[in-house]
Image: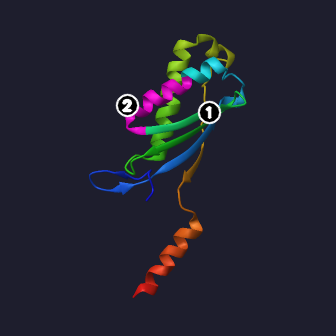
Amino acid sequence: MNNNIVKARTCVYNVNYHMVWSVKYRNKVLTSEIEQRLIEILQQTASEKEFIVHQAQVGEQDHLHVFVSAHPKIAPSYIVKMMKGISARKLFMEYPDLKKKLGNGPLWNRSFYLETVGSVSEDAIRQYIENQKKGE
């Protein structure tokens, strides 16, 4: 059985997301020091908002990849909103030069990429569903 399955009061689930978003105008401002603090902020935010950040990694100092798990009641757009909003606010407070480098504009681009991540392929699911009728 899958070890990633979580048993909650009303459901059993394995809900995972790959999320990616970039710095506004792809400015290369996410240094290794800022990346380390950013990941700490994301972990803290996840703990407070009841989702899990399994992995986070800055790419080319201008974008971020995050692997997240959450209860089905938590919308992925909410997860992104919380991580982007809280991290931007805290990083700007802790690194005032960061805001200057961005012309006093926002840290993150408004858009993001989202992909669901499962332990079973789409083909396997389709075949499993198709085979259910054969048991009648």
Identify the residue shown where x is 70% and y is 27%: 61
Q: Position of residue 19 (x, y in %)?
A: 57, 43
Relative vertical location of residue 51 with respect to residue 40 in this rendering, above or below: below
Judging by the rendered image, the residue that carries numbered circle 1 is 57
Identify the residue shown where x is 62% and y is 33%: 57
Q: Quadrant of residue 101?
A: top right
Identify the residue shown where x is 67% and y is 20%: 31
Identify the residue shown where x is 49% and y is 49%: 16
Residue furthest front in the image = 1
Q: Position of residue 109 (x, y in %)?
A: 63, 34
Which three-letter amino acid code belongs to the residue tagged 2? Glu
Front residue of this view, candidates 109 and 3: 3
The answer to whether residue 81 is left or right of residue 21 is left
Q: Position of residue 4 (x, y in %)?
A: 44, 50
Residue 48's tag is 2
Q: Quadrant of residue 30?
A: top right
* Main SS of residues in magenta: helix
Which residues are drawn in magenta?
Answer: 38-51
Q: Locate the C terminus by quadrant.
A: bottom left
User: Secondary structure beneath disc 2?
Assistant: helix
